[in-house]
Amino acid sequence: MASSSQRSNYKLTFFVLVTGVSSYALLQSLVIPALSSIQSSMHTSQNTVTWVVTAYLLSASIFTPIMGRIGDMYGKQKMFVVALGALGAGSVIAALAHTIGLLIIGRAVQGIGGGVLPLAFGIIRDEFPKEKLGSAIGTIAAMTAVGAGLGLVLAGPIIVHLGVDYLFWIPFAMTVIAALSAYFFVPESPVRTEGSINWGAALLLSGWLVTLLLAVSEAPVWGWGSSRVLILFGITAVLIALWMMVEHRVASPLIDMKMMAIPAVWTNNLTAFLFGIGMYSIFAFLPEFLQTPRATGYGFGFSTLVSGLYLLPMTTGMFILGLYSGKIAARFGSKTAVVAGSAISCFGYFTLAVAHSKGWQILIVSSLLGIGLGLAFSAMSNLIVMAVPSSQTGVASGMNANIRTIGGAVGAGIMSSIVTSSMLGDGFPSARGYTNGFIFLGVLTAIATLGALLIPRLDRSPAPRMNHAELSIVPGGTTTEG
């Protein structure tokens, strides 16, 4: 395990964090292009096979804040290794699965690895020099989106040349490398938060996430006005109210409601939710649009590989903007970056709604979304880290990522209903369904732009790095700020 003498080697730490986060991000989307193949080979229904994606998002939504909280209490480096271990174990289960049930279980285990996000942000906050915080946080945040987009690009050649099971073996190899590197080279932070895990709050959090995601994932099949969906939404509302009551009353909340009420936090979370709807929806439905046969009158008839390449400008733009997010924040401020990214993304979605008949139009929109999403996501994560004490970095950043994931799950259900509301005789959605869907994403991102304007303008410099010489040990071995 790394010792305190290695703290100066933050570049190695950063490389390890990027590798771990990239493994998690790839697994968000790498399996999406293979769903039809999985459905056929495992003799299951389309509705059931979608749980290969939903189980992963659901598990990540539950465990991201929990893992972040445990990391703040007991050690971020330890829990980063544990999260990667779960990601690797789930990958092995999924790669070896021969039934849809076992595959879904493997994906749920993988979702525990969602904890790498808050833990990586916390490690950066504790270990990196002040002048490197902005760019490091921005790059990690961008990698979550870049990895998801890159998964769609890489899925085609992996499926064709290696097989579906390698969609899990390749991330498994990355995860093993990252876990071993984290164990040996990433130092454990002395910063600790006193308290305990409130398992009642964790159970309520899990409950409302399950009912919410079950409702939105099944609504396109059951109907948004069906009794089952409405009952699930009602249960969700009750569980959320109970969860918030418990979090307000306990001494050691899983999610500090006072922290969540900080203007810089709740405005960022609102924007992240709306952005999550847009990003995950475009990742899921733009490739489907491009793969639709030309005989429908609007599709391109592209293969999985070619349709993925049309998303490459988007992933490239997000990665480049993530690399330079620190300099952008220092020059213009993180709030300005979020507002600009929201506006550019909004323009991209509306452009896609009216101009999607030529390949070059898709490439332009992909580039616009890469710039917009890259600017906004990187800056939002930076603002969250600046807005909260170092002891709450893991939970705050984890919940921000969590809300973005929830937004993606909710958006997928709504987008599916909009796109399939107008069908052609051959079973494909009509062009009008996709156009209405792209308009929907544009409207939501316009609202996100307004929400971004509400974000308080914080100091352009990231929160100061915790100086380890200023830490003191209190009885019981807990480390606190001195």
Image: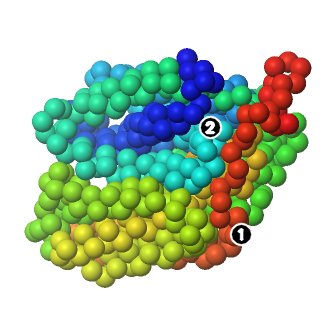
Q: Which mark is residue 172?
A: none
Q: Which mark is residue 127?
A: 2
Asked whether, in this view, residue 225 is left or right of residue 466, the answer is: left
Which quarter of the image is occupied by the C terminus? Answer: top right
Q: Where is residue 390 in the image (x, y as percent from the top left)?
A: 73, 43
Give the quarter of the image for residue 457: bottom right
Residue drawn at 56 percent across, 50 percent down: 132
Residue drawn at 47 percent across, 51 percent down: 139
Disc 1 packing (10 Å; few <14; some 14–19; many ≥20): some
Q: Can residue 180 be seen in this view?
A: yes
Disc 2 packing (10 Å; few <14; some 14–19; many ≥20): many
Residue extending farthest to the bottom is 354
Name the amino acid, label 2: Glu
Residue drawn at 83 percent across, 25 percent down: 473
- Image: 57 above or below 425: above
185 or 217, nearer to the observer? 185
- Image: 319 above or below 454: above
